[in-house]
Amino acid sequence: MGINTILLFITFSLLIILGLLNEERRQAAFSRSQNEWTVDIMGLLIQGVLIPAFPFIMVPILISFFPDHKGIFDVHPILGFSLSFLLVDYLYYWNHRLFHRRSYWPIHRLHHSSRQLDIFATSRNSVVTSFLFIYVWSQILGMFFLKDSTPYMLGLGLTFALDLWRHSGMKQPQWMHFTLGKILILPEQHVLHHSLTGRTKNYGANFCWWDQLHGTYSQTLIENKNLENIKGKNIWRELFIPWKVER
């Protein structure tokens, strides 16, 4: 079991426990409809099984076609970590903004269908969207081109752990807003992004710098409830052929 798997398992388990200990979040979680449970369980299977396995399928294929290019870049561990945790994070900012353009919104819309943001909403995506995240392809490229991809993969693992935390909907203590809030996108900022009025704010994953740089950052705090609703949607079409669903 790799360090990233352990990190994600611990993060996911801890956030689940903390969520269940909070009465309001516990009630929200168990008030899910059958459709909501179905789409979230499907999302967990896709994001937790299919997507992690994908790079281990693609990398051998790349090696078979381009054997001389495997591990051609020998970079310092700090640079390898920074490439994934910093550079890929900036590229994801634009990847995410692209999903919010009118032409691409149908394939991202399912991710914004949670009534209340919690850890299960992290993986609520259509199948096609799951394969269009830059993190998936950057992982494949890192594993293929880097001589030692361990630091690079550690950066991605930390990003995935922060993604779980960012979607947890948990309220952070005030001191965190004055410290980590100057660097990272906090769960409260991501709650705003999942609301009907805040979709064009806080696109970032790890760092809030990119939103501040491009004028899309907001510190507005809203209640983590009644954000959106999956009611009335054909969840199977949303999962597998979202571009054919009527707007």
Image (cartoon, grey):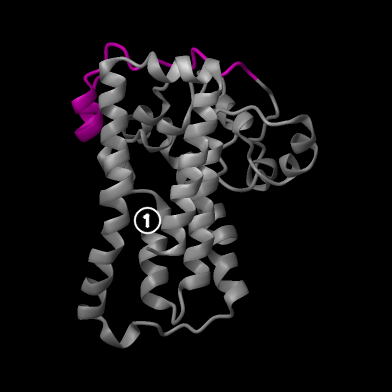
Q: Position of residue 29 (x, y in %)?
A: 42, 20
Residue annotated with mark 1: 136
Label 1 secondary element:
helix
The residue closer to the viewer here, 160 or 74, is: 160
Image quarter for residue 197? top right
Q: Residue 92 magenta-drawn?
A: no
Q: Position of residue 155 (x, y in %)?
A: 54, 61
Residue 66 seen in render: yes
Q: Position of residue 115 (x, y in %)?
A: 44, 17
The residue closer to the viewer here, 243 or 146, is: 146
Which residue sits at x=31%, y=14%?
33
Q: Position of residue 97 (x, y in %)?
A: 49, 40
The residue closer to the viewer here, 104 or 50, is: 50
Please give the range of residues in magenta.
Answer: 222-247
Which residue sits at x=59%, y=80%?
76
Which residue sits at x=36%, y=74%?
144
Q: Residue 230 magenta-drawn?
A: yes
The image quadrant where one finds the N terminus is: bottom left
